[in-house]
Amino acid sequence: MKFVQWPKDNNRSVIYTGFQNIGGFQNNIEAIDGTHFILTEISIQDLIAYFTRKKRYAIQYQEIVDFKGIFIHYVIE
């Protein structure tokens, strides 16, 4: 079984080299992105918690991947 995990010291040099090879990025071990999952139904008591700056109700999703696109971290709020 594999788990999402932050790279260990011995794997960081491989990731640094991978980012350097694919895009010329030096000393980089991650790429980050995110999105919002729009909520179509929400309880009245949770309205404030899920209201976004774009004036809609959503859950925020953010992920971090290495140079191969393998997830090393994610957050869903």
Image (cartoon, rainbow, N blue to C red):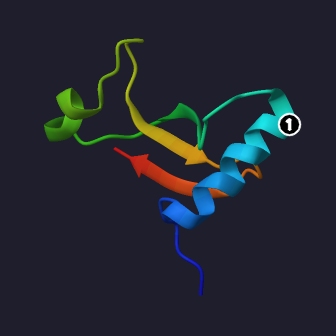
On screen, residue 7 above or below 53: below
Q: Quadrant of residue 26?
A: top right
Q: Secondary structure at mark 1?
A: helix
Q: Nearer the viewer, residue 48 or 29?
A: 29
Residue for point 39% across, 40% down: 41
Query: Looking at this rendering, what residue extends furthest in the left direction?
Result: 45
Q: Nearer the viewer, residue 63 or 48?
A: 63
User: With 56 as the anchor, is 47 left or right in this view?
Assistant: left
Residue 52 at x, y percent in the picture: 34, 20
Residue 32 at x, y percent in the picture: 56, 35
Q: Nearer the viewer, residue 53 or 15?
A: 15
Query: Looking at this rendering, what residue extends furthest in the top direction?
Result: 54
Query: Looking at this rendering, what residue extends furthest in the bottom direction?
Result: 1
On screen, residue 47 above or below 54: below
Residue for point 68% across, 51% down: 15
Q: Amino acid at mark 1?
A: Ile
On screen, residue 70 above or below 22: below
Residue for point 74% across, 39% down: 19
Q: Quadrant of residue 56?
A: top left
Residues packed near mark 1 inside 10 Å, few (<14), some (14 to 19) or many (20 plus) = few
User: With 12 as the anchor, is 55 left or right in this view?
Assistant: left
Per the image, the residue denoted by label 1 is 22
Residue 27 at x, y percent in the picture: 61, 35
Residue for point 30% across, 24% down: 51
User: With 41 as the anchor, is 22 left or right in this view?
Assistant: right
| Count of numbered circles on the image | 1
Image quarter where the N terminus lies is: bottom right
Image quarter where the C terminus lies is: top left
Residue 69 at x, y percent in the picture: 73, 50
